[in-house]
Amino acid sequence: MNADPYLRPAFSLRNRAARALWNVAWAVLFRPSPRIFFAWRRGLLRAFGARIAPRCNIYPKARVWAPWNLSCDEAATIADEAVVYNPAPVVLGSHAIVSQQAYLCGASHDVDDPAFPLVAAPITLGAYAWVAARATVLPGVTLGDYAVLALGSVATRDLDAGGIYVGVPARHVRQRRVAADRQQRTGQGAA
């Protein structure tokens, strides 16, 4: 074992081997698949342990770091060039969208610990939540149902249901009308 904590692997040999195998499958089978082959890509992700509901649209240029830590409910979407870095579980609710070049960052490092260990935390996107293009979601953050993280924004904390958030760090600017309309129709919160 190396005495320098910066040189120690953050993940087990088994984890690194599984990711190496997934990277080969991604490069050879997933990435070159035709854009409309959503069922094929769902099948590949499931073969590596992902829990993917029917009619999810995962595009061929999307990067999923660890499929076994990905769960997508009905009709969730991960667009081209979106990155799902998920050493901890990432859950996409029904109809949640991760747009082009968005980044779901499920881990960081403890900058105050001299060993600089990896610290992973789950990310959850509620039903109908949307992470817009080039937006970033940090470890441990939950987007409530119908929440929107606008273009290029960074979610450093949980986003309330139905809220629209912009900026770095993301700040609430207003409520999403579709969430308010749903609340009035059903007499419930934006569940």
Image (tube, rainbow, N blue to C red):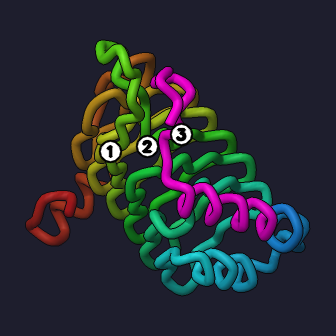
Q: Is residue 49 left or right of residue 123?
A: right
Report if the CB atoms under discs 2 and 1 are less than 8 Å apart.
Answer: yes
Q: Quadrant of the C terminus?
A: bottom left
Amino acid type of the residue tagged 2 in the rendering: Gly
The mark that comes first in sequence, 2 or 1, is 2
Which residue: 41% across, 34% down? 118
Vertical position of residue 83 compared to residue 62: above or below? above
Q: Residue at label 3?
A: 9
Residue bounds of the magenta highlight: 1-26
Report if the CB atoms under discs 1 and 3 are less than 8 Å apart.
Answer: no
Amino acid type of the residue tagged 3 in the rendering: Pro
Q: Residue at label 2?
A: 106
The mark that comes first in sequence, 1 or 3, is 3
Q: Main secondary structure of the magenta part?
A: helix
- Secondary structure under tag 3 reads loop
Which residue: 55% across, 51% down? 98
Residue lying farthest to the left in this orientation = 187
The mark that comes first in sequence, 2 or 3, is 3
Residue 121 badge: 1
Residue placed most toward the observer, 161 or 58:
58
* Residue neighbourhood size for the residue with mark 1, other residues' Cα within 10 Å, grouped as few (<14), some (14–19), many (≥20): some
122 in the magenta segment: no
State the CA–CA distance, disc 2 to disc 1: 6 Å
From the image, state whether disc 2 or disc 3 is nearer to you.
Answer: 3
* Residue 85 image offset from top left, x and y in percent: 54, 46
Amino acid type of the residue tagged 1 in the rendering: Ala
Residue 39 badge: none
Q: Quadrant of residue 181?
A: bottom left
Vertical position of residue 132 compared to residue 60: above or below? above
5 in the magenta segment: yes
- Secondary structure under tag 1 reads loop
State the CA–CA distance, disc 1 to disc 3: 18 Å
